[in-house]
Image (cartoon, rainbow, N blue to C red):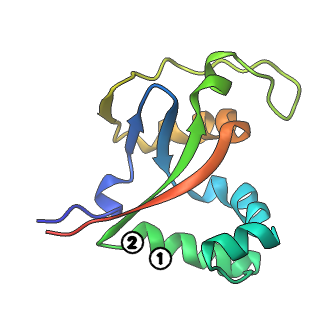
């Protein structure tokens, strides 16, 4: 069976330079701001969306059976303990390198997501086939 985003919604892929985390509602404001940039729209072949349309798109991507959409976090920003938007130093729990980790505890995500929003550098879609 082909994995789907919904069944992988707790999956984080961690590498030496970046971490891929599921595209979640908490990412929407930053993502929506990115996608107002004419250069990004042209490079991705996208049309500008309203925030309401972006919210609907995130839900569709979350429920897609053949695509996983991840936000890319810059590991170097995490490891340096950069200051968040509030000016406070954040503490990010260690994230293992060079392995796949599943954490099905949904309640553990919101705080971590809030602490890592400033490290968002992009997104990626993985299209799955049998």
Viewer-proximal residue, 104 or 129? 129
Residue that label 2 marks: 63
Residue 79, quarter of the rendered image:
top right
Disc 2 element: helix
Q: For the view shown, which residue lies furthest in the right direction?
A: 87
Q: Image check: 74 left or right of 21?
A: right
Circles 1 and 2 in contact, beta carbons < 8 Å: yes
Q: Residue at x 60, y 21 (%)?
A: 92
Q: Image check: 61 left or right of 128?
A: right
Q: Is residue 104 visible?
A: yes
Q: Position of residue 47 (x, y in %)?
A: 69, 83
Residue that label 1 marks: 60
User: How crowded is the residue under tag 2: few (<14 C-alpha within 10 Å), some, or many (20+)?
Assistant: some
Q: CA distance from mark 1 to mark 2?
A: 5 Å
Q: Residue at x 36, y 68 (%)?
A: 67
Q: Position of residue 94 (x, y in %)?
A: 49, 17
Q: Residue at x 56, y 55 (%)?
A: 123
Q: Is residue 36 visible?
A: no
Disc 1 element: helix
Q: Position of residue 89 (x, y in %)?
A: 78, 18
Residue 1, quarter of the rendered image:
bottom left
- 49 over 100 or under it: above or below: below
- 6 over 12 or under it: above or below: below
């Amino acid at each position: 069976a082909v994995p789907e985003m919904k069944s992988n919604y707790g999956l984080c892929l961690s590498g030496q330079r970046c971490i891929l985390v599921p595209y979640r509602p908490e990412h929407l404001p930053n993502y929506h701001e990115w996608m107002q940039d004419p250069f990004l729209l042209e490079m991705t072949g996208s049309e500008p969306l309203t925030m309401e349309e972006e919210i609907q798109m995130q839900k569709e991507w979350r429920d897609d059976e053949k695509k996983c959409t991840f936000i890319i976090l810059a590991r170097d920003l995490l490891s340096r303990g950069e200051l968040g938007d509030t000016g406070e130093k954040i503490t990010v729990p260690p994230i293992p390198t060079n392995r796949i980790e599943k954490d099905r505890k949904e309640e553990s995500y919101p705080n971590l997501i809030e602490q890592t929003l400033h490290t968002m550098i992009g997104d990626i879609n993985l299209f799955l086939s049998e």
